[in-house]
Amino acid sequence: MKKISILLFFSFALQAELKAEDGYRLWLRYDKISDPQKLSEYKRLIHGCIIEGNSSTIQVTKNELSIALKGLLGYDIPSSSLSTDGLIIAGTISSSPLIASLKLEDALKKVGDEGFIIRSMIVAGKKAIVIAANKDIGILYGTFNFLRVIQTQQDIKQLAIESSPKIKLRVLNHWDNLDRTVERGYAGFSLWDWHKLPDYIDPRYSDYARANASIGINGTVLTNVNANALILTPDYLKKVTALADLFRPYGIRVYLTARFSAPIEMGGLKTADPLDPLVKQWWKERAKEIYELIPDFGGFVVKANSEGQPGPQNYGRSHADGANMLAEAVQPFGGVVIWRAFVYDNNVPDDRAKQAFTEFKPLDGTFNSNVLVQVKNGAIDFQPREPFHPLFGAMPKTPLMIEFQITQEYLGFSTHLVYLSTLFKETLESDTYSKGAGSTVAKVIDGTLDRHQLSGMAGVANIGTDRNWCGHPFGQANWYSFGRLAWDHELSADQIADEWIRMTFSNNTTAIQPIKSIMLASRDIAVSYMTPLGLHHIMAWDHHYGPGPWIKDKPRRDWTSVYYHKADSLGVGFDRTSSGSNALAQYAPEIQNRYGSTETCPEKYLLWFHHVSWKFKMKSGKSLWDELCYHYSNGVDSMRWMRNTWNTVSSSVDEDRFKQVGTLLAIQENEAIWWRNACLLYFQTFSHMPIPTGLTLPDKTLDYYKKIEHPFAPGIGPKW
Ligand code: GCW
């Protein structure tokens, strides 16, 4: 009796576990289509599949298709011959005689190596859905796209899709240390289990690869840009090789960060001077060694002469000297060097926002052809809102790769729901005016504006060992958005949210509409309760969790908050016009004219570019002080709206995630209150003005907020 009840208990526990929505499956859930009409339509139109070819990429494609269709439709889809209607036929011209017979050459010419076409066609008298590509990887991408069509329950009767990526290198940057801590990581530890590699292959690695391939990500930088030379030793390279072998079928290339001083630390050389013949030789040998193990190794990513990292400037050489030396080493093997422009050196400049431009603009035209310069979306550091980085449009002779931060270092870690597509789009759509109106950041980085073959988009990953990968269930949407926008930056934030919600939560409009409205509003809400009207970098010291506008007296002025907001009795904001640091002069004249005056500067950037009197009259007619109070308060009120809106989806989404998100939103609301109170009390010590009547007054003292500490906030830990 006892035995039976124990058994029953276990089988229930197992069932419950099977049903639990723990977020592991991301947007690849493949649950059975819930709409009976759609289900029967799909069943009518899909009877089998023919996928010709036998590469490892074709193999993973077949697996994905069969797992997915079995889940979505509820039965095994047979591998068929051409005797019936309703076949999915996939392949390349060279691997599939059937595809070769369909005269798709002209269409395929347009989609390049990674693109694909999906078409409803008659093949040998039978109705079929054809997925064709030039290379096997296109078949995998096309298959994921086809599955997305079904997952989002679109019509499949007349399919006519042609798709190819607008950007060549679509790369995640993991700031993962070899001890498995993750710098600015809020989802547990690093996925890479270096200790057990290369022999133990965690099943998560292939799920990671599937997820990335499903959104077109084709590269992963495994290691932190604050790099450890150890990764270049033979033992570690074997571990890297195991990952590279596993990722290869999914079209994902592996990149490593190169510590500039590695020739000294590892090679026993006396110098890492990029012009020294022994140093050059040392890197050439390393490159050769790596490519022997990993023939499709992507290349090196380098953070040099920034935040204490070694670099060419230690030897009186330029960033271009450093980048070109490494570029020569990987060039024979088809590799690239991605050199970061996030630099600031030991001499604190008059305005940190200017430094990257000052150092890099003069180097335009001096980089080797296999170098990309990777530029953060804004000139300071992944703030909730920043104007686009002035380097975009300013280095036409160099392929610039954009770097976004998917992990929410400055946006509430994995506790706050902030959908980042809107932030990404805001930067991508910004007009640099570098070649007249319409010279958007997107056109700079996709290479079309200045005719570059190389192009890239990097996203600092928010992925870790948490069961749901990203910590916050909605963090997954930011990983998803990054990949989708790197593939096609013209997609809208709305469309991406729509797809993601359908695949991750539900196709039911009672879920989609409210969730989408939350997502689309969420970033502006976070800006309101954190850094409205152009305020920036006023987060708590070092870990950056929560408010810290009072931070001062640190080793560098530009590591303090007071440096960035410059509040005084007269007003608040950083004067970056000609009367101040003149960082504005780094932008095109059109931007300078518009942003240069307090009258025409968009209010969202007002305090970024101007030091403004507390009594300055805003467009609303309110004083700057009052406006600031309203922004902070609206941020908090919007959190209430967000929570109420989330509550409306209780019956449309699964209970597990409903509760989890609900709890996180409650924390977020409390923290929005924390932000509002702390910032208003602090800035009030300068404005000496009252919080407008009708707004909630802080219920604690400024001192109370100043004393809040989070000594164990995640994401800092040992750096290497
Ligand atoms: O945003 C800052 C982070 C550092 C990071 C640095 C960088 C990897 O606070 O943790 O270091 O940027 O981008 O190099």
Image (cartoon, rainbow, N blue to C red):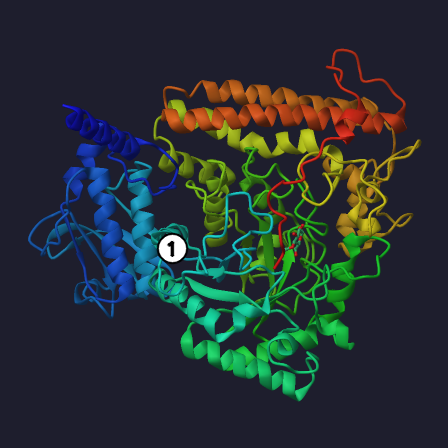
Furthest residue in direction front, as rendered: 2
Q: Tell me which residue sits at (76%, 54%) in the image.
A: 587
**Residue 263 location (% of width, % of height):** 63, 78
Regarding residue 453, the answer to whether it shows in the image is no
* Foreground residue among 568 and 594: 568
Q: Tell me which residue sits at (80%, 45%) in the image.
A: 560
Label 1: element kind: helix
Vertical position of residue 28 compared to residue 224: above or below: above
Residue beneath disc 1: 205
Vertical position of residue 8 compared to residue 319: above or below: above
Q: Tell me which residue sits at (22%, 68%) in the image.
A: 95
Corner quadrant of residue 390: bottom right
Corner quadrant of residue 586: bottom right
**Residue 168 location (% of width, % of height):** 48, 62
Question: On the rendered structure, is 609 left or right of 512?
Answer: right
Vertical position of residue 112 compared to residue 645: above or below: below
Furthest residue in direction top, as rendered: 694
Regarding residue 311, the answer to whether it shows in the image is yes
**The N terminus sits in image quarter:** top left
* Foreground residue among 609 and 480: 480
Furthest residue in direction bottom, as rendered: 277
**Residue 249 location (% of width, % of height):** 33, 63
Mark 1 crowdedness (10 Å alpha carbons): few <14, some 14-19, many ≥20: some
**Residue 335 location (% of width, % of height):** 50, 74
Corner quadrant of residue 697: top right
Question: On the rendered structure, is 575 left or right of 408?
Answer: right
The amino acid type, in three-letter code, at marker 1 is Tyr
**The C terminus sits in image quarter:** bottom right
